[in-house]
Image (cartoon, helix red, strand yellow):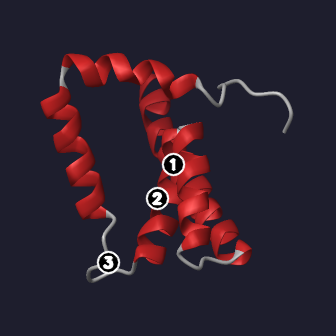
Amino acid sequence: MSDHFYTKDGLKSIGKLMELKPDLFGAFFAFDQKVFAAGALSVKVKELIAVGAAHITRCPYCIDGHVKRAKKAGATDEELAEAIFVGIAMSAGAAAAHSCIATDAM
């Protein structure tokens, strides 16, 4: 993609948040590192989960970062495609579930 809705340097302004609350930001990063460390699930599996979840949350920075981290952890393109489709299915499922609100309102 040559056009971006989000710029590559779009996260630069997050530095302001880090300056304002370094303790909270530090806690978040420590938590993130702990979550993505190998445990009962491998780093690769955790990154594939993150790729699917990033498609649900629609964060382009998370999609880019976690795809790269998944590849680094040994994920194949086929595994990444399946993880993406899991995210797509979960998002569609949530939309279908929420249709009950509309049908109740009808």
Whether residues under marks 1 and 3 lie with C-beta atoms below 8 angstroms apart, the answer is: no
Query: Which of 6/95 is in front?
Result: 6
Whether residues under marks 3 and 2 lie with C-beta atoms below 8 angstroms apart, the answer is: no
The span from disc 3 to disc 2 (Cα, nearest Å) is 14 Å
Can residue 92 be seen by looking at this rendering? no
Classed neighbour count for the residue bearing mark 2: other residues with Cα under 10 Å, few (<14), some (14–19), many (≥20): many
- Label 2 secondary element: helix
Quarter of image, res 2 = top right
* Image point (55%, 68%), residue name: 70
In the rendered view, would you say 99 is above or below 66?
A: above
The three-letter code of the residue at mark 3 reads Ala
Which one is closest to the eye, mark 1 or mark 3? 3
Q: Horizontally, is 82 left or right of 29 in the view?
A: right
Q: Horizontally, is 25 left or right of 94 in the view?
A: left
Which mark, by number, is residue 50? 2
Q: Horizontally, is 102 left or right of 28 in the view?
A: right
Q: Which residue in the protein does label 3 denote? A: 38
Whether residues under marks 2 and 1 lie with C-beta atoms below 8 angstroms apart, the answer is: yes
